[in-house]
Amino acid sequence: MSLIGFSAASPLDRHHDPLPKVTVPALGEMKRQGKPICALTAYDYATARLVDEAGIDLILVGDSLAMVVLGQENTLAITVDEMLHHTRAVRRAVRRALVVADMPFGSYHGAVGDAVSNAIRFVKEAGAEAVKIEGARVEMVRALTDAEVPVIGHLGLTPQSVHRMGGYRVQARTADAVLQLQADALALADAGAGAIVLEGIPREVAAAITAALPIPTIGIGAGPGCDGQILVFHDLVNLTFAPAAKFVRRYADAAALFRTAVERYREDVEHHAFPSDAESYHLPQSARGQFLATGQKEIANEEADSVVNADAREELNQG
Ligand code: KIV
């Protein structure tokens, strides 16, 4: 790891945030004011800092991390402990955005009491400010809300239902399914959900639900008629190693950027072009003569290494 602890210096610099913290009630206020809610996933300290500093309102530590970070086939295997680990990293980075933790498959599918305990772990142990659960689990939303854990619902294409749906398919394509989805969304709002993610549904359906709901909708593959939008960070910057879904817009090609940087580094090492003299520490003048006089190259080198490390920290601490 770099000797420059990039986390250590930052909190001090960031005490003067001009923008107020985003809260669940603030999302409702944004809907009332017609201000689009901008949401994105993040799963680690570095990306969460970038996302927060770019002014994103809501950061979801999505269980999509199972796929885009851990390389799993779907989102089903990720555990509460793994989600907690990533939520903690994101929480450390974020100053302004609302931090929402995705509850993983199995963590809210049994007894309500167990789900509440799991949700409380996200708040207590990882600093989440809300949790997201998939499906029309109205009583679960009510119980979590009663336990002071704000909940974001998630309807339409719910990835944790991949086996029931028979794949990742656009939902609500019949009149009956549209009516059911609308009723589910209203029931979740009534049970206390702070917002609802609408995924993979026709834009007309999402717009109608958005107009009917008192709480914000946040769309992904649900067209422009929602109160906000969310994308997976790795989709946005092309780090998924797979063709993008129709609803994804790639704003950068991080894969190309990273690949080029790593290849250039490898070439430089192979050609002895890295590190240069300017990128190396030097023995202090006072010690140089003594060092050369000893003629004991190996012992002198060991001593030089420990001096180099101590100096490095000192130099860096001095700015
Ligand atoms: O896990 C996830 O990333 C999600 C989406 C809504 C983006 O649930």
Image (cartoon, helix red, strand yellow):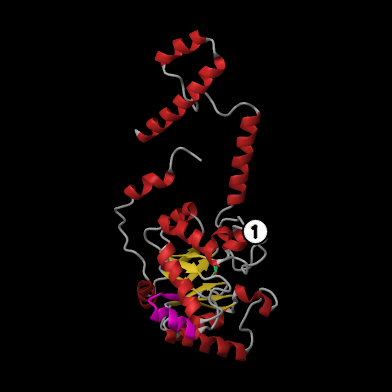
Is residue 250 visible in the rendered structure shown here? no
How many numbered circles does the render carry? 1
Give coordinates of residue 101: x percent, y percent. 48, 67
State which image quarter holds ligand 1: bottom right
34 is within the stretch colored magenta: no
Image: magenta residue range: 139-152
Where does residue 90 sit, x and y in percent of width and height? 46, 58
Viewer-closest of 38 and 3: 3
Residue in view at x 50 percent, y 28 percent = 279
Q: Is 234 located above or below residue 304 in the figure?
A: below
Quadrant of the image occupied by residue 249: bottom right
Q: Dot 1: what SS? A: loop
Q: Is residue 87 above or below residue 319?
A: below
Residue 271: give x, y in percent of width and height.
65, 27
Does 146 appear in magenta?
Answer: yes
Name the residue: 47% across, 26% down.
306
Please give the residue where the numbered disc 1 appears in the rendered image.
71
Residue at 57% x, 58% y is: 234
* Residue 73 seen in the figure: yes
Which quarter shows the C terminus? top left
Q: Residue at x 42, y 18 (%)?
A: 284
Q: Where's residue 196, x and y in %?
A: 48, 77
Identified by mark 1, the residue type is Gly
**Nearest to the observer: residue 187 or residue 202:** 187
